[in-house]
Image: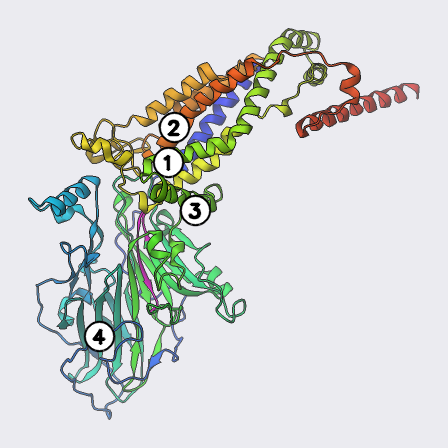
Amino acid sequence: MTPQARRRLIPLLVVFLAGSVLSVLIFGPKKPNDSQNQPIPESPVAVAENDVVENNVVEKTNTEEKSAAVETPKVAPAEPKVANTNLKPFEILSLKKHSISSDPIILGSLTDYKNWKMEVVFASDGAGITSIRFSDIYETVDGKLAWNQFRESGGEQPSFEKLYLLATSDVFNDHVATVLGAYQVVINDQKLSLTSSDVWSVTNTTENSVSFEANIVDANENNIAVIQRIWTLGDGYELHVAQTIKNLTGQEFTVRWLQYGPSTLTVDRSRYMDRRRFRFGWELSDEFDPDHAAPIQSVDFLYEFTDATKDSAETLWPTEETTEGGFKLSWFASTNRYFSLAVMPNINDEGKGNRIITDKIESITSSVKGANEDQFILTGLWSPATSVAGGATYDLTMSVYAGPLQRSVLDNKQPYIALNMREMVLYQMSSMCAICTFQWLADFLGVVLTTLDQYVVFDWGLAIILLVLIVRGILHPITKKSQINMQRFGKVMQKLKPEIDKLKQKYPNDPKRVQSEQMVLMQKYGVNPFQMLGCLPMFLQMPIWIALYALLYFMFDIRQQPAFFGIFQMLGDWPFLADLSSADHFFGKFDTPTHFLLWNITGINVLPILMGAIFFIQQKYMSPQSMATSPEQASQQKIMRIMMVVLFPMMLYSAPSGLTLYILTSSSVGIIESKRIRKHIDELPLEPQTASPTSAKNKKSKDKQGRAWTDAMEARRKKVQNKAKKRNFKKRD
């Protein structure tokens, strides 16, 4: 292969590899898992079997006592019969059966959306949750418009399925796995399953609470222990579960509790990528933070969905790193693009209480159901093995957050402030690309955009356009200087091209000599590549594009928000720019998303096409004349043009329309800016003039780039002179 052919081939390979790597990072398919449905492991991997914890036993005999943080309704179940304390240690234990009620138990409301944020449906299977559906958050823009119209004007009520479903129960190993349902209790090494509906009885229900009870008996039907789960729904996105295990005997026993934890949430319909994650909040060890003054941490430890599915039965917490660092668990959450389901310690509305939950959750395990696109991850929350004295109660009370990843909620309300749960809002494309996402920049842009929307233009689309003008205004001096230098450099290189061709003919086998002579020639005309900033303005905008990309993709506030006051939706429900967090849908959207090659297509979009057209106009009419001094360089520049015009819009075809609107507006403003700069350039004397040898040798440029060029040329000249002296010295010898 000739050197010229290799030079043409290398850019093609680089572009192909870069596109392939970027595509894999963004669109990479989930790793297939061919394993069959696995139950929650019988014991977590990293937990010692014989560890017994006694410091979290609550010496209470009144199970109806109010929680320290949330007042739970008083329940008056029938007084259980206390077992004979003279019996031998328990040999055979079982759960007492109860009659099964098929009626669902509902807390909250979907129609009374002003008083209730959600509706939570409970079942006796594991005394857990069947479904969590929001009353004022919607699956699609169409559902949002339909429900808003119904609530404002009346008419036929839309389907409840148009309201967003956060979590639902699933069938797992022939039993119903309810959300956060009880799975198993272990008493003196005897495992008792709690998933069946006939072992739980409903003892009391109110407007915002429901109580479940399960009784453990021995072979003689003597009551050994009673388990209670009292669910309370708050007026926001919080739930509270007061769960206790009371020892009804005079003998001590060891108990260990296992329940379902937050499982993987659903994937967003208009997703551009799957970003379901498992998140952890943790506190530093006493060695580093003895006063517990540091905020709860949440960085460094997270699982992407694909990472968590690599092993069908994996311990998520603790890991070797967390154990070695002595980190203590505070909260555990499953998140998707916009929502979170998290378990957390019981802290009151003033942010007071123990921030650590390790006395109730010692380890977290995962189990994978299904394969490929249908994979679903269940998590298990294991309590430590705990010694419960006769008549004592083991308290496993915890709270639950089931709501959006919304900064206005997590930033301003307790207990989320005390637990630093704002850190669940992560503007990050993936853990592998965290370094190029610039979380701090995305947070800053979020503040700027929110300020522009709420206090300046009152529209997200206009706020994005105004942000473009602000950024372009800040970068205008650099852009202007860059284009002036590029024009000057281009004209000089066009004039020097015949002389450079002569140098190549004169030294056909010495490219270093050609390069050295070319540098001398450029110095003679007073120009150097360091003075040309080139694509610096574009590179300065790239971090903003990446951060804005992450922001617009994950920011809940912009979800299902239209552009330009929804003017396009007034024209016969046109879906164009009805949701800035999804593609623009200029030619309509599909009822069912279509997966094509690397894209999840929800409609036919126009903004990426216009983006490619704008890029073509920029390169065709606004870019400076070609500065290629060889066919190889011309070929490389051509490949870059094709990459900008075709590949870049293709990669952003299904991206959030807010991002494509930003890039399209920025490019359009750039064309107008370039025209004005070119008009200014025409008034400047840009024709190259030969620099005098004396001034070139003795006078240094005032700018940093010029000094760098002069220093480089001086170093090159001295290096050549030293080599010549060495050759002459050898000849004299």
Q: Quadrant of the C terminus?
A: top right
Q: In the rendered view, tell whether residue 297 sits above or below residue 455.
A: below
Q: Nearer the viewer, residue 155 or 62?
A: 155
Tell whether label 1 touches label 2 (CB within 8 Å).
yes
Q: Is residue 295 left or right of residue 518?
A: left
Q: Crowding at label 4, few (<14), some or many (≥20) Cα neighbours within 10 Å?
A: many
Q: Nearer the viewer, residue 262 or 469?
A: 469
Q: In the rendered view, tell whether residue 106 sits above or below residue 377.
A: below
Tell me which label, 2 or 3, sits earlier in the chain.
3
The residue indicated by pointer 3 is: 443
Tell me which label, 1 or 4, sits earlier in the chain.
4
- The residue sitting at 41% across, 17% down in the picture is 617
The residue indicated by pointer 4 is: 228
Quote the CA–CA distance across marks 2 and 4.
Answer: 59 Å
For mark 2, give the secondary structure.
helix
Residue extending furthest toward the front: 456
Tell me which label, 1 or 3, sits earlier in the chain.
3
The label on residue 702 is none
Tell whether label 4 touches label 1 (CB within 8 Å).
no
User: Within the magenta stretch, is there residue 152?
Assistant: no
Q: Nearer the viewer, residue 692 or 6?
A: 692
Q: Nearer the viewer, mark 1 or mark 3?
A: 1
The label on residue 665 is 2
Q: In the rendered view, tell whether residue 406 sits above or below residue 509.
A: below
The residue indicated by pointer 1 is: 464
Tell me which label, 3 or 4, sits earlier in the chain.
4
- The residue sitting at 32% across, 65% down in the picture is 381
Q: Crowding at label 3, few (<14), some or many (≥20) Cα neighbours within 10 Å?
A: some
Quadrant of the rendered image containing residue 732: top right
